[in-house]
Amino acid sequence: MQTIKEYLTNDHRKCDEVFAQMEAKAGEALSDAKELTAAFVEDMEKHFQMEERVMFLEFETKTGMTQGPTAMMRQEHMQMRGLMSQLIEAIDADNKDKFFGLTETLMILLQQHNMKEEQMLYPMAQQHLSTESNRIINMMDSLVVE
């Protein structure tokens, strides 16, 4: 049985792998990275929605904490969504400098964000939601991205 923390941490790693592939491909030719960038954005959006639409809501319902760590994570998700849309724009404009400047910023934000989730929020969620882990993981797994 996988925990919520393990499930979401593993998903972070999958997104990180696609990010690394995207950067490597962009180093060869920016236009060649368009597909991988779209895949990265799609993977990240699914991850954000698994958290926002399932895990965060379950956590907030169980704990009553709606203005705590989940509110901060939602703000960071919005910030990263903005950067990811700018990545697509940089590719469309064939602006390598802008693309790599954005990936550098995004990488720093992702590392800090993931660390907060993995070291603080996910353990808190697991503590409060451990009896519901399977149900919550199944909900996240079957989520259709809007």
Image (cartoon, rainbow, N blue to C red):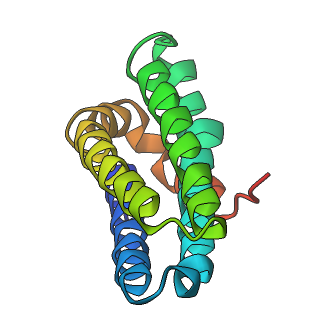
Q: Nearer the viewer, residue 87 or 1?
A: 87
Q: Looking at the picture, how far across and down is residue 26, in whole percent?
A: 43, 80
Q: Could you tell me residue 141's position as x and y percent?
A: 61, 64
- Where the N terminus falls, by quadrant? bottom left
Q: Nearer the viewer, residue 36 or 10?
A: 36
Decide: is 146 above or below 26: above
- Give the image quarter of residue 92: bottom right
The residue nearer to you, when weighing 37 against 4, is 37
Tell me which residue sits at (35%, 67%) in the image. Answer: 16
x then y, percent, for residue 64: 50, 11
Residue 144 is left or right of residue 60, and the answer is right
Q: Is residue 116 left or right of residue 138?
A: left
Task: Kindly tell me whether residue 126 is visible in this rendering.
Answer: yes
Q: Is residue 70 above or below residue 102?
A: above
Residue 7: in sight, yes or no?
no
Residue at the outermost right position: 146
Q: Is residue 59 left or right of residue 122?
A: right
Can you say whether 109 is above or below 76 in the image?
Answer: below
Quarter-of-image position of residue 20: bottom left
Question: Image height check: is 12 above or below 85?
Answer: below
130 sits left or right of 141 in the view: left
Report the residue at 60% width, 29% height from top.
57
Quick one: 32 or 49, which is closer to the camera? Answer: 32
Task: Name the residue located 25 percent from the left edge and 49 percent from the top edge.
Answer: 111
Numbered label tally: 0
Q: Position of residue 99 (x, y in %)?
A: 45, 61
